[in-house]
Amino acid sequence: MTAVIQARGLGKKYGQRWALSECTLDIPAGRVVGLVGPNGAGKTTLLNLAVGQMQPTAGSIEVLGGRPASGPEQLAKVGYVAQDAPTYAGLSVGEHLRLGARLNPRWDDAVARERIGRLGLEPGHRAGKLSGGQRAQLALTLGIAKRPELLILDEPVAALDPLARREFLQGLMEAVAEHSLSVVLSSHLVSDLERTCDYLIVLVESRVQVAGDVDDLLATHHRLTGPRKDTLPQDQHVVSESHTDRQSTYVVRTDGRIHDPAWTVGQLGLEDLVLAYMTPAPSRPTLEAIR
Amino acid sequence: MIWLTLRQFRVQAAAVFGGLAVLGVFLAATGPGLADDYGRGLASCTAQHNCDQFGSRFFSEHWGNYGVLVAIIIALPGLIGVFWGAPLITRELETGTHRLVWNQSITRTRWLAVKLGLVGLSAMVAAGIAVLALSWWADPLDKAGVSEQPRITPLLFGAHGVVPIGYAGLAFVLGVTAGVLTRRTLPAMAITLAVFAAVQVVTPLWIRPHLVPPKSATVTITQQNLSQMTLDNGADVMEVQTSAAPGAWTIENRTVDASGHEAALPPSLMNGACAPAPPEAGHEPPPGPPEKCFTEIARLGFKQKVVYQPADRFWLLQWAETGLFAVLALGLSGLCFYWTRRRLS
């Protein structure tokens, strides 16, 4: 399995603050990868490092086997729809396509025209006059018609209303099916990613908490509910815990089955799984010390 | 990339080149008349042997228009720096479009090279056209004003020859550099304006005089070389200035004593040898001090020391200054490339 993004101890520091630290990742090819985490977790930083928009402070990152933005060939292989889908307000839709055609050797004009036509965008309209959803679609069109091997999208639907959100993600999935793209998209909402992604990375407080195939993640995470208990057997990796006076709820990651009859074992949805990583138990260090 | 650069640049380009076209129409409409007037005046003054007076009269009659045109040429590079240079990169950074364009299949280096090259070249072409048109129009005035205001003197020097092209290139790159460093348009514009204005003041005061070592001469003060004599009875001060050479730029002009040290003329001269002749009824007063004034100054051992750049060094100084600006502009361009590749995101 070849990696589209391979990071080793990757870190980025702004002044005194690490926006991303000790990030080691192998993202396989041919997947639609969701990068999820709260605002300010370092998602944009990771994506910016992957497209070479900025340079890492520590560690290394390789994208499709090359250093990000190291040359025109590397740039041609990676498409990027940046946060807020920037477009030139003064340029028309048609001029954006012309820009794409002039700056990208692999530009697929037929795909671009077809998409613009299907979306009902007038080539003569200025990008500054488009709605947020239309602008995002225009930016996506530029990213797709560039014919990259990997398309990276940073919070592409954050500013869109639910309908535009669905249309955007549908358009993205069609392109993935048609051009066999690898995709990495970030969001702070799991619901955006649930229907599109088959691989998930959870990033919290500048660190990767968990990364893996969505089906594997769902199969190995369990919610345990039972009478109050402050510790669990040693082979259980506790993701989060919460307690009331009488009852304890744990989210654990384990490959084995859970046999203890004291616990009621429940399955987790993707959203619950991500939330469990976003709100780790405050007492977890002590627990680990006991282990 | 060329297409995109031109597309983004077209409004600003239209504003400046449109302004230059208006200027061109004015110059074309008034230029031939000016040349004719000068030619006729010259013919009649040659017949009457009073061409010196004609020259300075003709120059001061038209100085109003000429001054405004010179001011435009001097201001043009600054405007280019502020409105073409400063926003070149900051506009992309402020609207986030750098994240769009840097992720097309083109490196930042090439992106910046095309932008700097095309717009910088346009800046130099704009300045070149302007200075060429002005030089054509003002040719009679430059001839008439050769003793009043030679073109090597600071004000006119900056609006002639190749120097304005160098200024335009430097101002543009300065604007881009300020933009790359501050990342915001308005501060970049303000910095560009302030720094470039400082360059325009500092250059003629402290840099241009020394680009080529100036000539120096200590001369006897005579009726012929005297350009100005001030008698101030109230302050008890008497001063003289001499003209160094025809059409020269005088940098220093001071009276020295017999040993060569800077000295003041004795005020007693004002009421003695150099006292103006009493007005006689029915006669024009004589134009200058009496001849015995000069004899007396010479007898006391006073001379005039002048440091100057002679008129024939005009082009030497023009190329030297343009070369200096070219080096500065290249240095700043290098900084822009480094900063854009390494520090911007």
Image (cartoon, helix red, strand yellow):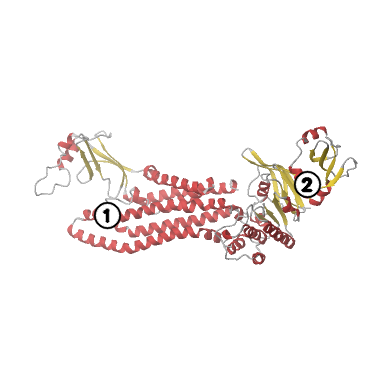
* Mark 1: secondary structure: helix
The quarter of the displayed image where residue A207 is located: top right
Residue A7 percent across, percent down from the top left: 72, 46
Q: Closer to the observer: label 2 or label 1?
A: 2
Q: Which mark is residue B344?
A: none
* Identity of the residue drawn at 75% across and 40% down: A280
- Foreground of the two, B159 or B72: B72
- State which quarter of the image contains the N terminus of chain B: bottom right
Q: Which residue is disc 1 drawn over?
A: B59
Residue A232 percent across, percent down from the top left: 85, 37
* Mark 2: secondary structure: helix
Q: How many marks?
A: 2
- Foreground of the two, B116 or A25: A25
Instruction: Please tell me whether residue B140 is drawn above or below residue B243 in the rendered image.
Output: below
Label 1 neighbourhood size at 10 Å, few (<14), some (14-19), many (20+)?
many
**Residue B331 shows up from this direction:** no
The quarter of the displayed image where residue B213 is located: top left
Q: Amino acid at mark 1?
A: Phe
Q: Amino acid at mark 2?
A: Leu
- Foreground of the two, B235 or B302: B235
Which chain's residue wears label 1? B
**Dots 2 and 1: beta carbons under 8 Å?**
no
Which chain's residue wears label 2? A
Q: Which residue is disc 2 drawn over?
A: A273
Q: Is residue B209 left or right of residue A76?
A: left
Query: Do pointers 2 and 1 mark residues of a single chain?
Result: no
Residue B195 percent across, percent down from the top left: 45, 45
Residue B198 percent across, percent down from the top left: 42, 44
